[in-house]
Amino acid sequence: MARVEESHYRRLFREFLRQSYINGLHPFLYHSPVRYAKAAWLALLTAIMIYTHIVIADLILEYLVQPTEIHMDPDLVHVANSPFPAVGVCTSNKISGRLLRGYAEKLFHHQGNSSLQAVALDLDDIADRLLVLAQFYLNPRESDHERWNALELDQLHRLLVGYHGGGGYSVRDILWDLSPGCGDLVIRGIVFGAPVNTSQLFLKRVTSSNVCCIFNYRRPSYSKFLTKRAEHDSEMRAVPRVVFESNSILNSVQFVLQDTPKEDITNTFHSNDAFQLTIFPQEDYATIQSTTLGEVLVDHYSIVEIPIQPMFFSSGEEVRGVPPHIRRCYYPEEGMRLLNQSYYSLDECLLVCRTKSMLDHCGCVSSPLIGSSMDFEYCLLPDLPCLMRWKGIWYGYSDFAYLQNKEENLAQRQCEHCLPTCNGVSMSITTNVAPLRRTYNSTGYFTGLLKGLTNERPLAIIKLFFKLRFAQATKSQMVSSWVVLLNRFGGILSLMYGFSIVSYIEILYYLTGKGFVYIYRSFLDNEPKNHHYSLYWRELKIPRMPEIRRNLPTQK
């Protein structure tokens, strides 16, 4: 019985080799004088089939991960269609010594007229303790220095609450009041060839790392108090809009930066005295959390040119059908629905995610890190130790990173839902640095943008301009549909060994359909027969005539 089944399988296999449309199978049917020729041919076909299906599996996995392909649009777009970015200029001196002294005097006099006389602090002690407010900024490494214990923080907290009438105080607004003014930081400027009044173009705003003077800013105010918020918004609306002049020869903006005098510098744990520039979209919050542009440091007595190159990107309507986690971007309405607000960007999403993380960890948010006027509980001085611990967990800085616990690892991965936008403009920058010649006479510089200025205070010049007149545009299109994937499969299979979808059906047929028939028939042939005694036609066959005559008796 086993031999019968083996013969059936052999017969089925030989029929498959004879009838199949797959190239390379017929040599197995014929005799070859070369020894091991069929074995070598079988090994070659097996290697080709394995390699082909590995390539097909890679194509399938690539399609499942990213079913879109980026096509470069051959049409160049003029940079006049790109909005000029916002530019934040910050000084390393986060708190002005002169303004700090004046604020400390007000607290000192209020202390003498209040119930805090029993624990009264002198003027220098108050001014020194107020420097702890700089710990509310983003800078992670600065949060390592816990300058005061909880008792001293609570004492300063009660002093500030009493000074502000018992109704609470805003750390953001105090930092805003203690920082240098924009007219003292950015003193001169030229915008597209025309001199401008810098005090009318720069807005003083609290950012995540400092109080900066921001040029070309279009984000509403995020002050805690309605009156100050309305004042800031009115100031922003009064700022003239900067429009790129495509026919201008001097298509750049230039500003002269002037640092604070030595007697005005306070110790805020910053080791670098260079100016800090942040370049970002007009509506975003000024932070370097996710932008690829980072932060540009401008040293004293230097000229820094910053060419800006925009790149336009968009996605076709057919890409909307792909889930966001596969196409790795959000359309405007998807992002706004995700954040439940009227504006979305990658930085905005990370800002909201960071805010929720602070709120879950400490029950409040640091006002310089919130970037909006949403109704949250703002952290005050007693909450500062918790904020320091949160910054250590959030940014994951540790001298022993391998000792991080589960909470620290999860904190760094909780904003993975934040994705960039599908349509918009991205920018790349480079820097060209040259030294600024110093002047040693009392009259200062004689010509140019620095005319009349001296070196009594450190100076620097920044120039920002579009690098090229035209920018490249990219468009994400749905070109890798399942039909295209099927065409790729057919091309690869045909190229390798003349394979096709019909060949798969043919193999399936021989393994299931025809193979089943062969097995069924072999089973029927091997069934035991019932023996019945019956007559067959051959037994009933009539004898031939000569035989009949021979058997007849002879007549006498």
Image (cartoon, helix red, strand yellow):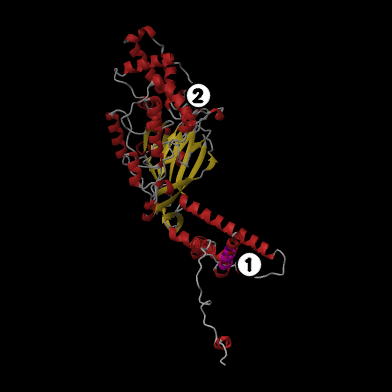
Span highlighted in magenta in the image: 8-15
Element marked by disc 1: helix
Please tell me which residue is depicted at 33% across the width and 46% down the height of the picture. 333
Element marked by disc 2: helix
Residue 10 figure quarter: bottom right
- Residue 125 image position (x, y, % from top left): 43, 14
- Spot the residue most to the front: 556
Please tell me which residue is depicted at 31% across the width and 28% down the height of the picture. 224
Q: Using the image, tell me which numbered label, if any, was put on residue 546.
A: none
Foreground: 81 or 10? 10
Any magenta on residue 11? yes
The answer, for residue 452, to whether it is visible in the render is: no
The chief SS type of the magenta part is helix
Residue 479 figure quarter: bottom left
Any magenta on residue 389? no
- Residue 103 image position (x, y, % from top left): 37, 20
The residue that label 2 is drawn on is 144
Foreground: 72 or 394? 394
Q: Using the image, tell me which numbered label, if any, was put on residue 28.
A: 1
Residue 387, compared with residue 196, is above or below; it is above
